[in-house]
């Protein structure tokens, strides 16, 4: 095989060379004033990135670790929460919550649409005893490609006059879709390094606003490794509950520098434009009748990932295998209920026009090579759209 593999899985994502280079250095003594200053700067810059006056906690863990951290710091055994279903990830998060002796009320979903804010409002209004302590929302559901309107969810909670916390899994949206925590009234955000943040897997975050910090004080769940309180200690060693992942810290410092250089609003706009470009291709391919968008409402299709449902006897896993093995494009598969029924194109993090066109080109060649019926001119439509919107 020659040339590059185009990594279009919705996590992990492409790691820019300068971030890799920032990590390519020998280990050091973690107790030097220089490294302590770097860590101090990192936590302060993270607060800016999450747009909160609260606290940001970082863990040497994938997203599942940060999920657990959000649970044990905010919820006590016996609590009730509302977890509107979105797809695979809301279901796994909900099941994790149940393991902590917490009752999770659900709002069922067909895995083809975003959360309906009205249903959230209705569920909260029904909770006249105010038993629900938190509403847990997956922002971009990576399994289905839908994005939930967080401002509308906040408005729904307020309309019900309910005191529940708003906790958001932004693992697949952070750095891709707008998420200004304090301004948008989000109390806790969960993120991970390997998606929009363009980093290796292994660092995840919970950002806690003032209300979440207050709730965590009274939370009675047993915790130590994940504990926000013990991580708040001034001593930097405690910030990671042990030795800091120095190389990840250096990588993240470069990531945050890159984000500042491009500007977070420009990054969000870039994702919107490249996401739309990917959707243009899928729209044209769909004309052949062998596939369609998984997310039905165009307004709920995320800018991080597009999930494509195949129709009839078109095998999405065969498309993935041929795309990867023959044409050097790695795509995501259908998860859980969508297994064998869909494939997914990630377009988050380190991405520009020719990268996206290259990846979509690989898929286009795959469809032609396999004889999958598809509309013609997808790449031309993408190219035109990108030219017009530049
Ligand atoms: C990827 C992802 C997760 C899981 O993250 P891991 O790092 O694999 O543990 C959770 N939620 C969403 C929305 C995701 O995209």
Image: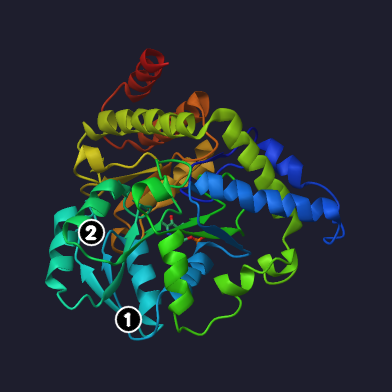
Res 285 → quadrant: top left
Q: Is residue 338 left or right of residue 247?
A: left
Q: In this view, does 101 lie to the left or right of 29?
A: left
Which quarter of the figure is the C terminus placed in?
top left
At 46% from the left and 83% from the top, the residue drawn is: 221
From what the image shows, is residue 135 above or below residue 105?
Answer: above
Q: Residue 159 appears at what percent x and percent y?
A: 17, 56
Res 96 → quadrant: bottom left
Location of mark 2 (residue): 157
Task: State whether residue 199 appears in this view.
Answer: no
Task: State whether residue 167 appears in this view.
Answer: yes
Q: Is residue 13 left or right of residue 27?
A: left
Q: In this view, does 297 lie to the left or right of 48?
A: left
Location of mark 1 (residue): 79
From what the image shows, is residue 62 above or below residue 315?
Answer: below
At 78% from the left and 56% from the top, the residue drawn is: 36
Q: Nearer the viewer, residue 154 or 18?
A: 154
């Amino acid at each position: 095989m020659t040339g590059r593999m185009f990594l279009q899985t919705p996590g992990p994502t492409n790691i820019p060379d300068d971030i890799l280079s920032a990590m390519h250095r020998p280990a050091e003594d973690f107790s030097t004033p220089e490294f302590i200053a770097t860590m101090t700067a990192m936590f302060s810059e993270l607060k800016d990135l999450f747009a909160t006056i609260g606290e940001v906690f970082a863990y040497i863990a994938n997203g599942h670790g940060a999920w657990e951290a959000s649970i044990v710091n905010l919820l006590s055994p016996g609590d009730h929460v509302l977890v509107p279903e979105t797809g695979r990830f809301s279901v796994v998060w909900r099941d994790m919550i149940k393991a902590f002796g917490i009752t999770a009320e659900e709002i069922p979903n067909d895995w083809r649409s975003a959360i309906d804010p009205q249903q959230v409002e209705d569920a909260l209004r029904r909770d006249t005893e105010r038993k629900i302590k938190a509403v847990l929302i997956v922002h971009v559901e990576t399994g289905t490609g839908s994005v939930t309107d967080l401002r509308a969810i906040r408005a729904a909670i307020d309309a019900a006059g309910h005191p529940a916390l708003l906790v958001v899994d932004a693992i697949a949206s952070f750095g891709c879709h707008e998420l200004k925590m304090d301004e948008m009234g989000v109390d806790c955000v969960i993120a991970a390094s390997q998606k929009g943040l363009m980093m290796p897997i292994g660092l995840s975050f919970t950002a806690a606003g003032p209300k979440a910090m207050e709730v965590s004080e009274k939370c009675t769940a047993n915790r130590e490794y994940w504990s926000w309180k013990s991580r708040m200690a001034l001593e930097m060693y405690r910030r990671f509950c042990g030795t800091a992942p120095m190389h990840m810290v250096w990588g993240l410092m470069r990531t945050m520098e890159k984000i500042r250089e491009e500007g977070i609003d420009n990054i969000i706009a870039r994702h919107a434009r490249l996401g739309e470009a990917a959707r243009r291709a899928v729209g044209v391919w769909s004309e052949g009748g062998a596939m369609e968008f998984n997310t039905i409402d165009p307004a709920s299709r995320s800018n991080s990932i597009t999930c494509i449902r195949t129709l009839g006897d078109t095998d999405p896993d065969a498309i993935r295998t041929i795309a990867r093995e023959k044409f050097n494009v790695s795509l995501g598969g259908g998860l859980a209920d969508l297994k064998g029924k869909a494939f997914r194109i990630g377009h988050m993090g380190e991405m520009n026009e020719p990268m996206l066109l290259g990846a979509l080109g690989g898929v286009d060649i795959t469809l032609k090579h396999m004889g999958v019926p598809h509309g013609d001119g997808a790449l031309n439509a993408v190219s035109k759209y990108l030219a017009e919107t530049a």
